[in-house]
Amino acid sequence: MLIAVAIFLLTITLIIWQPRGLGVGWSAALGAVLALLAGVVSVGDIPTVWAIVWNATATFIAVIIISLLLDEAGFFEWAALHVARWSGGRGGRLFAFTVLLGAAVSAVFANDGVALILTPIVVSMLVALRFSAASTLAFVMAAGFIADTASLPLVVSNLVNIVSADYFGLGFNTYAAVMVPVNLVSIAATLAVLWLFFRRDIPAAYDVALVKEPRLAIRDRAVFRVGWITLAALVLGLFVLEPLGVPVSAVAAACALVLFTVAACGQVISTRRVLRDAPWHVVIFSLGMYMVVYGLKNAGLTGYLISAFNYLAGYGVWGAALGTGVLTALLSSVMNNMPTVLLGALSIEASAATGVVREAMVYANIIGCDLGPKITPIGSLATLLWLHVLARKGIRVTWGYYFKVGSVLTLPVLLITLSALAIRLGF
């Protein structure tokens, strides 16, 4: 077990530190190789792990490619400018609408879409509106926060969701039926705590005349128009085709291919750059990181979690939901949400929990791993990349400030969301 834990800690350290620009995929691959050489995992474990991660990874990449194409077409800037105009010059309304826009983007384009694509657009818009540094930071933190707290509703909204849904055989419709109402509660709670925390930094008014015409943001009209059809087909296809046995990744890949073809024919968007910027490293990261985590499972670490889950199961749906969610949230905040969700899934599968109590644990594990990363900067790759994007925009968020804000904001939203889950499963 000591060897497995040491390899895991080394891998996480390299992923966070990224010495000399070492990519997260190669860090995870190194961890997997060390785990194989040390004997904590075997070659026979590779197909098992790949069966867990392939669909999630392929779906994630397809959705991000769609996001990148729409971003190049001006789709997200167009939406942000409309939000600025609809707010009518009122700062509080703009803050709320920005959060709601982030929630909508997170639901369809995954949390990474908000963190990596929408955040820079919001920053540019605030600069154009001549917001102060404090006001800009409030909006930026809100956009980054809602990216994860609103990533619950659909299987495709977060890589964590896809992994869990695949592992436990949760259909797209079954998952949405539980998590859509829970996500609405999470959004409301997030908006409330964000407003209470940042209300003094939100300007009362701004000059709408400084907001450019949304139509001027559109750079590729063909991709922009087909993008709406693609998004409708994506959501409809997932609801209709996934229950028939079609993998989520196949639906997402087909939609990405259609939009990519339109972009390639138009020759306005550099499709070569889109492919280059796609997160291919996530494929290596997913397989490598989960091999390392599987080593922890083989070494018996999941036994401690199984004992904890069996204890929580004795307190019914409420105990299972709140206990599991808080536990996995704390683990995600210190060891990253990607390894945590698999450890949680493996432990829940091996626990004695049954029926609705087990169901509560499955969904609470997802909620904990979606929201828990907001407590610390190392909780998720999306947050680390988000901080990097902000630094390039000249906005520096220290780890101390992030932890102070993250812990204060996350815990109440987490508890409220987990309570909503317990109530939802009680019906």
Image: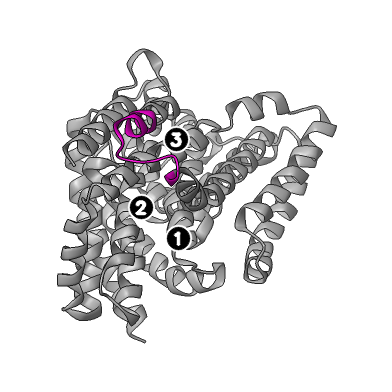
Tag 3 and tag 2, C-beta contact below 8 Å = no
Taking depth in this image into account, of 238 and 420 the one nearest to the observer is 238
Location of residue 111 in the rendering, given as x and y in whole percent from the top left corner: 45, 47
Location of residue 281 in the rendering, given as x and y in whole percent from the top left corner: 51, 31
Between the residue at mark 3 and the residue at mark 2, the CA separation in whole angstroms equals 14 Å
The residue positioned 69% from the left and 59% from the top of the image is 232
Magenta highlight range: 31-45
> Most prominent secondary structure in the magenta stretch?
helix
Name which residue type carries label 1: Tyr
Name which residue type carries label 2: Leu
The residue positioned 48% from the left and 32% from the top of the image is 120
At label 2, counting other C-alpha atoms closer than 10 Å, the crowd grade (few under 14, some 14-19, many 20 or more) is many
Q: Secondary structure at mark 1?
A: helix
Which residue is label 2 attached to?
342
Q: Secondary structure at mark 2?
A: helix
| Whether residue 307 is visible | yes
Which residue is label 1 attached to?
167
Location of residue 162 in the rendering, given as x and y in whole percent from the top left corner: 49, 55
Tag 1 and tag 2, C-beta contact below 8 Å = yes
Q: Please state, as top left, top right, bottom left or bottom right, where the N terminus lies in the image.
A: top left
Between the residue at mark 1 and the residue at mark 2, the CA separation in whole angstroms equals 9 Å
Name which residue type carries label 3: Phe
Which residue is label 3 attached to?
285
